[in-house]
Image (cartoon, rainbow, N blue to C red):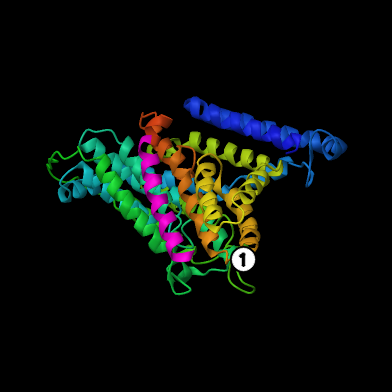
């Protein structure tokens, strides 16, 4: 390992330790860490020879991370989507529709346990076709309204919604970025996630994991069996914000079947990288224009912009830059190569290492650059073992997608969910999140791990 790679790994480790230890200053930690990586890149541009031959030399070339490179690492699609959806969700909340939905839910469910299960499964279904973050932002208000109605903490419910959203990201080609990357590398289309070469596809493996995870949720909420009182339904006078939110969801589903440029075949229609973000911003702006010029309600417009969670946006922005920095410093390559070198000669051992190391690493690092790196390594490993790479591809997707549920900062959906709780006055400790995230993740991963081996070994 080169000195700059080791240095970047140390900076990265310190960053995550500080974020886990000091939750209230997470955005400042990530921004400071991002600035350090950018500063190293500036020094590299001023004195290239130092980075080509000296301390900062990489075995694969010189370290390079310019300001432009750092900005390009930021997923503006996610940032725009969070901002736009949060604004629309605020209008949705102000319309009192979440309260009405919670009233209906209360009238249909016998107790708190089944409400959490229902919301979690519903979030999972939506998340198989809509981005995980957007799913959390749309469904969390329903959980908040319900918990306020029954005077209980919304923390467990929203954590379960977030982890369920992450689980279903691996169910379809459009469920998550990692699925899109896998489909491109393995030459899969949408139907292959349901039936692939005569075998059941990843969709059904994920559903099996969802069923087992639901049993875990039922067990964890087994004591919440008290009957829920119901004293009438909230009246909703303005349904337009609901139409905006439904329009956002349907539009996201519609464009999910259009590939991005990198995944499109020659001559095939493709969509820009920020398509989802533009959709979310556009529907929010429609709502704002209506409130401002038709309803003449300037106060709700002002509050809508205030309700956007800038804390979460800054945190994610800093994380994107940090991940780009460690990728440029070769940390991702070192991690991937280390995994590839372990367990040689045994298909089961290599498969096991890929799944569980992916789970562990994705709990702390962004799974997109990690997955992209490993997708280039998997065919080489499969060739050495003399097997088709399908088993290892699916094992990678299973571990990398679900591993983010282990920690509160392991996935963007978790960060968004915790951000919503923070705005409601609930500071979620890492131990509190992991109380729900760890058993949920283990149940889902073990189920997927076993089924994938039985199907594809």
Q: Is residue 309 left or right of residue 368?
A: left
Q: Is residue 414 magenta?
A: no
Q: Specify few, some or many for label 1: CA neighbours under 10 Å numbering under 14, 14-19, or 20 or more.
A: few
- Read off the residue under disc 1: 386
Q: Main secondary structure of the magenta part?
A: helix
- The quarter of the displayed image where residue 111 is located: top left
Q: Residue furthest front?
A: 345
| Image spot of residue 212 (x, y percent) | 32, 52
> Residue 68: image x %, image y %?
72, 44
Q: Is residue 439 magenta?
A: yes
| Residue 10 in sight here | yes
Q: Nearer the viewer, residue 23 or 310?
A: 23
SS at mark 1 in the image:
loop
Image coordinates for residue 330, horizontal then vertical, percent: 70, 43
Tell me residue 443's x, y (percent). 37, 48
x 65%, y 35%: residue: 9
Q: Is residue 130 above or below residue 99?
A: below
The magenta region covers 435-457
Taking the image as shown, residue 60 lies to the left or right of residue 217, namely right
Q: Is 381 displayed left or right of 367 in the figure? A: right
| Picture quarter with the N terminus | top right
Residue 95, can we see it?
A: no
From the viewer's side, name the closer residue of 402 and 423: 402
Q: What is the number of callouts on the image?
A: 1
């Amino acid at each position: 390992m080169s000195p700059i790679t080791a240095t970047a790994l140390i900076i990265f480790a310190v960053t995550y330790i500080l974020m886990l230890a000091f939750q209230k200053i997470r955005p400042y930690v990530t921004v400071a860490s991002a600035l350090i990586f950018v500063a190293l890149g500036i020094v590299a541009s001023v004195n290239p020879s130092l980075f080509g031959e000296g301390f900062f030399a990489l075995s694969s070339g010189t370290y390079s991370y310019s300001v432009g490179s750092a900005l390009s690492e930021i997923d503006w699609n996610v940032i725009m989507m969070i901002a736009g959806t949060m604004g629309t969700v605020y209008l949705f909340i102000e319309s009192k529709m979440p309260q009405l939905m919670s009233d209906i839910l209360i009238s249909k469910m016998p107790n708190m346990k089944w409400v959490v299960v229902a919301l979690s499964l519903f979030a999972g279904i939506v998340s198989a076709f809509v981005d995980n973050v957007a799913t959390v932002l749309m469904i969390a208000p329903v959980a908040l309204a319900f918990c306020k109605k029954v005077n209980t903490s919304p923390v467990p419910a929203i954590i379960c919604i977030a982890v369920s959203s992450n689980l279903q990201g691996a169910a379809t080609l459009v469920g998550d970025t990692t699925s899109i990357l896998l489909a491109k590398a393995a030459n899969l289309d949408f139907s292959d996630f349901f039936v692939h070469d005569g075998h059941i596809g990843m969709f059904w493996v994920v559903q099996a994991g969802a069923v087992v995870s639901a049993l875990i949720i039922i067990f964890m909420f087994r004591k919440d069996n008290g009957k829920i009182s119901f004293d009438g339904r909230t009246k909703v006078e303005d349904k337009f914000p609901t139409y905006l939110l439904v329009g956002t969801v349907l539009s996201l589903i519609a464009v999910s079947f259009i590939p991005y440029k990198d995944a499109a075949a020659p001559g095939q229609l493709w969509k820009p990288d920020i398509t989802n973000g533009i959709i979310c911003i556009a529907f929010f702006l429609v709502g704002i224009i209506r409130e401002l010029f038709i309803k003449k309600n300037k106060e709700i417009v002002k509050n809508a912009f205030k309700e956007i969670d800038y804390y979460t946006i800054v945190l994610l922005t800093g994380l994107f830059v940090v991940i780009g920095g460690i990728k440029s410093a070769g940390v991702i390559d070192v991690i991937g190569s280390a995994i590839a070198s372990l367990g040689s000669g045994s298909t089961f051992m290599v498969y096991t290492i890929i799944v569980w190391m992916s789970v562990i690493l994705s709990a702390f690092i962004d799974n997109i650059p990690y997955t992209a790196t490993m997708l280039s390594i998997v065919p080489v490993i499969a060739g050495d073992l003399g097997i088709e790479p399908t088993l290892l591809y699916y094992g990678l997707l299973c571990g990398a997608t679900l591993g983010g549920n282990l920690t509160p900062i392991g996935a963007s959906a978790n960060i968004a969910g915790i951000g919503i709780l923070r705005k409601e006055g609930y500071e979620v400790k890492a131990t509190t999140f992991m109380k729900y995230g760890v058993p949920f993740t283990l149940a889902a991963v073990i189920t997927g791990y076993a089924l994938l081996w039985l199907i594809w070994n």
